[in-house]
Image (cartoon, rainbow, N blue to C red):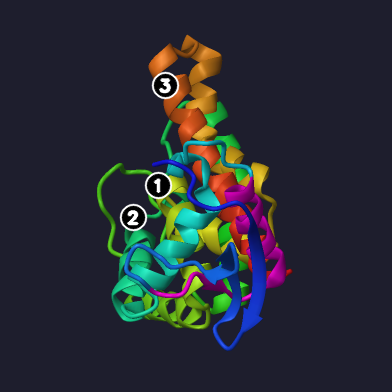
Amino acid sequence: MKRFYRTAAVAEDEAGYALTLDGRVARTPARNVLAVPSRALAEAICAEWQAQPDTIDPRSMRLTRLANTAIDRVRDRREDVIGEIARYAETDLLCYRAAEPAELVARQSAAWQPLLDWLARRYDSTLTVTDTGTPTPQPAHAIAALRGALAAFDAYTLTALHVVTAAAGSLVIALALAENEIEAERAFELSQLDEAFQMTQWGEDAEAAARRAALRADLLMAARFMELCRA
């Protein structure tokens, strides 16, 4: 699509901080006003639009895409999205440990258990850890507590949490990131602990490297989106 505007800007209105294109309020694919809760996020989205060359590349506007998702797909179906995110806790990466080798067992315990302990303190949600490799049901009250925690976030943060949770395979990691318990790069490292260990043993092929890079990009962009929402 050819660039159809000269100037992108930010305007404050009742919907929040809206993107404008040549003075007109921009809209999402579902024709909702493209407005976000913080000026910092709006300005970052504006910068994406202003940076577009003669031909617009939607793939380069990742913050815009997250905002569109929050407005068009999450805002009006919060309970469904909360349920989708909470289901990750039923098979959370941090709860499924290796039985061997001893070095990997030790690495997982040292890196992951502190976050599970934090989760128990912060949300009164104690998840069960297993090394059997088979699905292990989580306590119903623990899952309910996590659903309650998710309900406190707005649609924009929920959107970013969904991305982080899917990229990391862990709601625990996503919540720790949202609560500033860990930083984005650390969140990625924790989610890739098993893969990193395997690389030290066998190396890494190009396909695996590309997949890791894509997951890292998704996680870091969602983390930035959350941070800008709070700015």
The disc labelled 1 sits on which kind of residue? Tyr
Depth check: 69 or 3 in front? 3
- Pointer 3 and pointer 1: residues touching (CB < 8 Å)? no
Residue carrying label 3: 208
- Left or right, 175 with respect to 165, comes to right
Q: Position of residue 136 (x, y in %)?
A: 28, 57
Residue carrying label 1: 96
Mark 3: which secondary structure? helix
Characterize the magenta stretch by its predominant secondary structure: helix
- Pointer 1 and pointer 2: residues touching (CB < 8 Å)? yes
Residue at 66 percent across and 42 percent down: it is 185
Q: Which residues are magenta?
A: 32-50
Quadrant that contains the N terminus: top left
**Dot 1 crowding, Cα within 10 Å, few <14, some 14–19, many 20+:** some
Residue at 31 percent across and 66 percent down: it is 84
The disc labelled 3 sits on which kind of residue? Ala
Q: Of label 1 and label 2, which has the lower sequence position?
A: 2
Residue 208 shown in magenta: no
Alpha carbon distance from label 2 to label 3: 22 Å
